[in-house]
Image: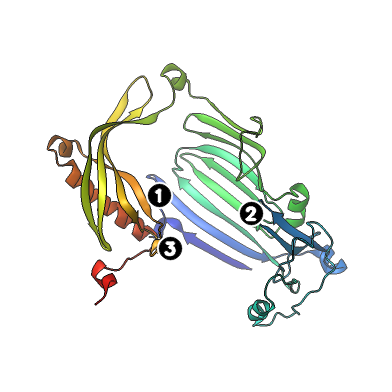
């Protein structure tokens, strides 16, 4: 049995927490699975997998308890059908050899599964939050699909009291396979946020289309002010100046930007609103902000920053925007632990 926790508020790499959050701690508990029936009767090997328009995969799982061999196998989808009993070979013996990954690499392409784990374990993990939770009240449960590592999950959020998230991995695999034999995680829940009540009734967690019935996945406005004042709060923009061409100096070189000054309004169509100034910018080429962006065509191309009223009055909004854009890019790079080389160092001798 292993127990581990992590204080997210003390993590310098975690996203900034909202004001008023007192506790935010993740936890993991790993314990052995009993599996009494399979220990007495043996596992029931069955082909599991996933089919999508772009790719298909097959592996082996016990249809009774949901345990997978290690490795789980990589079968040919044109030969093996999902939920078909597996009567093929198991290539790795128990105990697992240390060089099993190298041996599998030598096989190349699809390969049979390995041995059943001698001491299968499951994990109960979650997160506890006390304090503000981004202004929502919600609860929901999830049932994992056949190819999902997580079997069940539950979440309760009550702003500004706190939130509790719990996820099972390994436990209840057999039950999850029977409840949700498909290839998409199902969810049931209610969510009250931003003046709208949303619901999901055994709906696909990661997929929605216009053909999804409203009773299964939909939302409705519940804030009476939206009806009285013309709708929910939103941002509206009006271009006031620009476009101006400017350059910004970053660690990895100089980028040319197109700047547009905008008057920004936030509020309902009728009634009081909050006004401010923002500058929308677009770069002449992608600016890398992640390690994977370096040397590729990926990166950020456009965004916006806010500027003060005084900068607009003094007509120095472009200079202030460039300073804030440079800080914006550096913040993104620090969040993703990306440290580009100096332009001179990249050029070489």
Question: Which image quarter: residue 94?
Answer: bottom right
Return the x and y of residue 184 as percentages of the image width and height.
Answer: 67, 48
**Side of 226 where 118 appears, left or right:** right
- Residue at (37, 52) in percent of width and height: 300
Return the x and y of residue 42 as percentages of the image width and height.
Answer: 85, 68
Upstream in the sequence, badge 2 or badge 1? 1
- Residue at (22, 38) in percent of width and height: 242
| SS for dot 1 | loop
How many labels sit on residues?
A: 3
> Which of the numbered marks, if any, corresponds to residue 292?
3
Question: Which image quarter: residue 79?
Answer: bottom right
> Crowdedness of circle 3 by 10 Å Cα count: few (<14), some, many (20+)?
few
> Which of the numbered marks, if any, corresponds to residue 74?
none
Question: Does the residue at mark 2 contact the one at mark 1 (Cβ under 8 Å)?
Answer: no
Upstream in the sequence, badge 3 or badge 2? 2
| SS for dot 2 | loop
Residue at image mark 1: 17
> Crowdedness of circle 2 by 10 Å Cα count: few (<14), some, many (20+)?
few
From the viewer's perspective, is the residue at label 3 or at label 2 nearer?
2
Return the x and y of residue 69 as percentages of the image width and height.
Answer: 73, 69
Upstream in the sequence, badge 3 or badge 1? 1
Residue at image mark 2: 54
Return the x and y of residue 222 as percentages of the image width and height.
Answer: 52, 25
Distance from Cα at disc 3 to Cα at disc 1: 26 Å
Question: Does the residue at mark 3 contact the one at mark 2 (Cβ under 8 Å)?
Answer: no
> Crowdedness of circle 1 by 10 Å Cα count: few (<14), some, many (20+)?
some
Above or below, 187 relative to 126: above
Distance from Cα at disc 2 to Cα at disc 1: 38 Å
- Residue at (36, 19) in percent of width and height: 270
């Amino acid at each position: 049995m292993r127990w581990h926790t992590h204080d997210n508020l003390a993590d310098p790499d975690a996203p900034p927490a909202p004001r008023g959050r007192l506790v935010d701690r993740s936890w993991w508990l790993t314990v052995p699975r009993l599996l009494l029936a399979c220990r007495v009767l043996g596992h029931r090997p069955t082909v599991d997998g996933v089919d999508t328009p772009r790719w298909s995969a097959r592996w082996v799982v016990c249809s009774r308890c949901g345990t997978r061999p290690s490795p789980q196998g990589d079968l040919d989808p044109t030969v093996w059908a999902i939920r078909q009993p597996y009567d093929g070979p198991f290539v790795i013996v128990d105990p697992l050899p240390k060089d099993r990954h190298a041996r599998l690499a030598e096989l190349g392409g699809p390969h049979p599964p390995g041995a059943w784990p001698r001491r299968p374990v499951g994990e109960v993990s979650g997160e506890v939050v006390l304090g503000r939770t981004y202004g929502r009240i919600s609860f929901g449960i999830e049932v994992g699909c056949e190819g999902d590592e997580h079997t069940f999950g539950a979440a309760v959020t009550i702003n500004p009291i706190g939130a509790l998230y719990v996820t099972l991995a390994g436990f209840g695999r057999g039950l999850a396979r029977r409840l949700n034999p498909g290839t998409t995680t199902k969810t049931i829940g209610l969510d009250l946020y931003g003046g709208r009540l949303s619901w999901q009734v055994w709906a696909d967690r990661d997929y929605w289309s216009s053909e999804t019935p409203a009773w299964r996945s939909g939302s409705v406005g519940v804030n009476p002010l939206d009806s009285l004042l013309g709708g929910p709060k939103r941002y509206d923009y009006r271009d006031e100046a620009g476009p101006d061409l400017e350059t910004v100096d970053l660690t990895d070189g100089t980028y040319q930007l197109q700047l547009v000054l905008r008057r920004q309004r936030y509020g309902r169509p009728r009634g009081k609103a909050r006004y401010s100034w923002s500058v929308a910018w677009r770069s002449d080429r992608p600016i890398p902000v992640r390690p994977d962006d370096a040397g590729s065509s990926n990166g950020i191309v456009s965004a916006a920053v806010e500027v003060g009223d005084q900068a607009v009055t003094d007509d120095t909004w472009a200079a202030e925007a460039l300073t804030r854009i440079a800080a914006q890019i550096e913040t993104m790079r620090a969040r993703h632990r990306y440290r580009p080389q100096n332009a001179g160092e990249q050029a070489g001798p």
